[in-house]
Amino acid sequence: MKIIACCKAAPEEQDIVVRDDGSLDFSRADYKFGSYDLNAIEAARVLADQVGGEVIGLSVGSSELANSKLRKDALSRGLDELVVVTRSSVGEDANDSVSDLSMSDLSVSNLDSYQTAKLLADALEQMGDYDLVLCGAGSSDFYAQQVGNQLGALLGITSLSAINSIKPDVESDAEISEAATNIDSVIVQRLLEQEVQCVRVKLPAVLSVTSGINVPRIAGMKDILAAGKKPVKELVALGTPETSTQTISVKAPPAASRKQEIIQGDANESVARLLELASSVLR
Amino acid sequence: MSNYSIWVVAHEADAAAELVSGALCLSSNVNAVTFGGEAVAKAAQAQGALTVLSVNAIDTPATDVSAMGTPATDVSAVGTSGPDNTLKNCLPENHSKALAKLLQERNSKLTIFSATATGRLMAGMVASHLGTSAYNAASITINDDTPVITSMVYGGCAIATRRLLSSQAVITVGAGVLGAVLPESQEPQASALSAALPESQEPQASALSSALPEAAESELALSEPQASGSIEQIDLSVNDNAAVVLEVKPRKTESVNLAAAKRVIGVGRGFAAKEDLELAFNLASKLDAELACSRPITESENWMARERYIGVSGVVVKPELYIALGISGQIQHMVGVNQAKTIIAINKDKNAPVFKQADYGIVGDIYEVLPVLTSALS
Ligand SMILES: Cc1cc2nc3c(=O)[nH]c(=O)nc-3n(C[C@H](O)[C@H](O)[C@H](O)COP(=O)(O)OP(=O)(O)OC[C@H]3O[C@@H](n4cnc5c(N)ncnc54)[C@H](O)[C@@H]3O)c2cc1C
């Protein structure tokens, strides 16, 4: 079984600094793969180990994807191979048209979910046959939760979201080892707001998994060393469709200032001190 | 009022009512495509949709269950009727391609879905067929015939304001976003998000009491002030390779109203086991506080209902007091509580980010501090 796990690198949100005027400073924020994309990689690995097969990571982005540490990080989480798709150059392939010129280059290089899905679909076409494409619950920067949904529709195959478990559609475990590469459908559980659906999905399909489907593995030293030897393929995007939005502004809402009275010490003393300081709100 | 052509798509009566009445704050030209039978279509009509196209339920075509071997679960539910005689084994999202074509024919400039898993999936698929992106809007206005939406980005650290350039834009909205001013006690989660926006970006307000969940079913039939629009039954073909629903189980949901609580206690992964939450329960009962949690407590541990998780993708609260217990204080969580009047945090890691966003903090083990605090409050 050939499983593709899609993942997006985005600036580490905890390191984005909000300037006094509410604009964002990304200079200290390194790129990392979104934590929910790791659930997709993990789900792909688990299924591939169960039925036999390979897991290929697929990421669309810009220059950040050239970073070998970032690549190794994804590869150390259970991928057999990584395919990165970069756009020729941000300048000539201008996307998100930004009215506020003071905004960072970053937003100029941002793709919307249709553009991303289209580039992923083009890449999948170049990569040949596949059985299953997995996406996470949403990227850590925009969290539109749409790339998987849009990708399935573009590929003309089944697209389902909120997937909380994936099992090969076979009668017994014995059949799994026999069938090996020949699984043509999976049974998934979808966690909706009011109900849980059990759905049979014919492959190939695109499934977007929940953040609760598994606990992504933490890469050990061995995994990280092995990751350095795994293949990375680079594809250049054929052409990006026009953007569907114009970003007017990206701004932090005003934040409340906090007292930050932090108490350290033994539990009894700390509680006594807290009751002193915060007596009015705890009555 | 603009005459901008809006279509809403809904598969539940409450959502149909709320989306139509809310969209009428944006334009007088609001129409609906409904799934799920007469009740849903009528709800849209009653709120004033000009045209309602009610999609006839179809069985998912030709997947021979027996030929595919016994699935991992019980298949007895295949093809059974839903509450309003709709066939449950065909998902509304299976019609996305035909739906996109229909919206194109009807010249929908803006199509609105509700921000549920089903609504979002349909929106994304339809958007792809229309050659555009689907966006989730925390607020929306129409300026010069162009929708302008806001969304939380970067884990909630900022709000992006975007103009939708597509001539056939697609969005999803959470409950309460579309201009509805709901009574405080019934305020749904998402409305708190729009309330967090700067004044000037807030959507136009209008009172829509009939869009409230409880009122929707019982009172709609009685009060049909402007139910002049037509309901047409239509057939929509099913996508190739449509998924087949084998079984549907209701999910345990909880009706909590965190938004109305004066005091909220949030528990995080600092709790090692579900039983240990008792420490938090005890404190909550002393303080007459509502219990809430971080997203992993709901999604990974499954210790609390999803209605109780706070943050950018969950509930936004504005209590007088928020107490974070064993919560690290990541931005995605804190954006849901940063409008609390006072924040207290207890965490054993003195470098936990939560302390930077707290008024008072105790660096300590919740297992030691909580019993002392709870008994000290007697
Ligand atoms: C796109 C996206 C959306 C998200 N949306 C949300 C959201 O809406 N809401 C949300 O909550 N999260 C959300 N998250 C997840 C978020 O990033 C954090 O992972 C999550 O909030 C962490 O939860 P936590 O603080 O309970 O767990 P952790 O980060 O694991 O923190 C546990 C804390 O407990 C402390 N601790 C451990 N043991 C003890 C003890 N005995 N006594 C005292 N302290 C102890 C530790 O020091 C640590 O600080 C989102 C993530 C993404 C990527």
Image (cartoon, coloured by chain):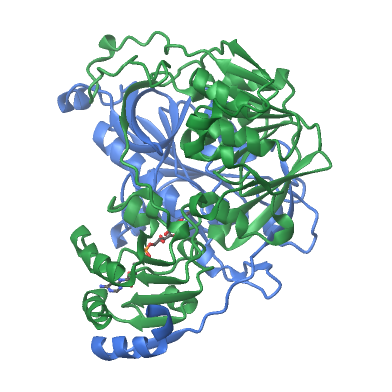
Chain colours: A blue, B green
Q: Which residue is the extreme one toward the front? A: B222
For residue A134, above or below residue B66: below
Q: Which residue is drawn at 34% across and 78% down?
A: B349
- Split into quadrants, the picture shows ligand 1 in the one at bottom left
Position of residue B88 measured from the top left corner of the image (x, y, whole percent): 39, 20
Q: In which quarter of the image is residue A164?
A: top left
- Exactly how many numbered labels are in the figure? 0
Q: Position of B372 compared to B341: left or right?
A: left
Q: Can residue A130 be seen from the camera position used here?
A: yes
Q: Which of B175 and A191 is in front in this view?
A: B175
Q: Which of A250 and A25 is in front in this view?
A: A250
Q: Which of B73 and B109 is in front in this view?
A: B109
For residue B296, above or below residue A150: below
Q: Which of B163 and B221 is in front in this view?
A: B221
Which quadrant: the N terminus of chain B? Answer: top right
Position of residue B177 measured from the top left corner of the image (x, y, whole percent): 61, 46
Q: Position of B132 compared to B340: left or right?
A: right
Position of residue B276 measured from the top left corner of the image (x, y, whole percent): 20, 64
Q: Residue at x 38, y 22 (%)?
A: B83
Q: Which residue is the extreme one toward the right? A: B144
Q: Residue at x 38, y 31 (%)?
A: A2
Q: Can residue A229 be seen from the camera position used here?
A: no
Which quadrant: the C terminus of chain B? Answer: bottom left
